[in-house]
Amino acid sequence: MRKKKKKENYVTKINKKDPFNWWNKFWIVLTIFIVILEFIGLIFFRQTIQPKSIMILSFGIPFILTAFQYRQLRKTKVFIVWLLISMSLFGLFLYLKYNSNLFTNKGLYQIRGLKAPTYFLIAFYIFRKISTSIWKTELIMPSRGNRYDTEEGRKTNLMDYIAFFSYWLIIVFTYFYS
């Protein structure tokens, strides 16, 4: 008779001593650098600033968070740093909205996306709390091909899909409501 192989548990370990590994530092520093460039552009080059670059920034940060930082957002310090970055973008949105002489109406429409990273992180926090309290699992990114995640050692559940598709709906709806 054959012995069954014991299934290995591939649960992601979070290093509490080093929450900011090189991967986190890379994306955080890159994002802060781009946000600072946008601030400088808005302050010194008001006549030539393009609202399209702000729109790319507002879609780019949620993309970075979902594609490269999704598991890392479980770390409290990483989440707080990203929340501070997104709150600064939200502050930039409020500044641009109420200082309306900078942009035309089309430009004001394009800057609405600066709220998207903040809403994304709030939704991530809420969905993560729901997932840990109801399903007793952390959120994972659903993949296209296989429902089994080797790093977590489990299949994706309904909450993973609900959260993932809700993020993108939230980001799209931020452009429709100011």
Image (cartoon, rainbow, N blue to C red):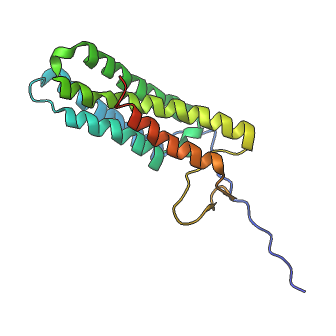
Residue at left 50%, top 32%? 121
Left or right, 14 with reference to 91: right
**Any part of residue 11 in sight:** yes
Q: Quadrant of residue 171?
A: top left
**Residue 5: percent from left, percent from top:** 80, 74
Q: Quadrant of residue 150?
A: bottom right
In this view, the residue in front, 177 or 41, is 177
**Residue 51: percent from left, percent from top:** 20, 32
Q: Is residue 160 above or below residue 103?
A: below
In this view, the residue in front, 77 or 46, is 46
Q: Residue furthest left?
A: 47
Left or right, 59 with reference to 48: right
**Any part of residue 18 in sight:** no
Q: The C terminus lies in which quarter of the figure?
A: top left
Residue at left 67%, top 40%? 131
Residue at left 58%, top 45%? 162
**Residue 145: percent from left, percent from top:** 53, 66
Residue at left 59%, top 37%? 75
Q: Quadrant of residue 139?
A: top right
Q: Residue furthest front?
A: 176
Q: How many marks?
A: 0
**Residue 50: percent from left, percent from top:** 16, 33
Q: Residue furthest top?
A: 98
Left or right, 174 with reference to 148: left
Q: Residue furthest right?
A: 1
Q: The N terminus lies in which quarter of the figure?
A: bottom right
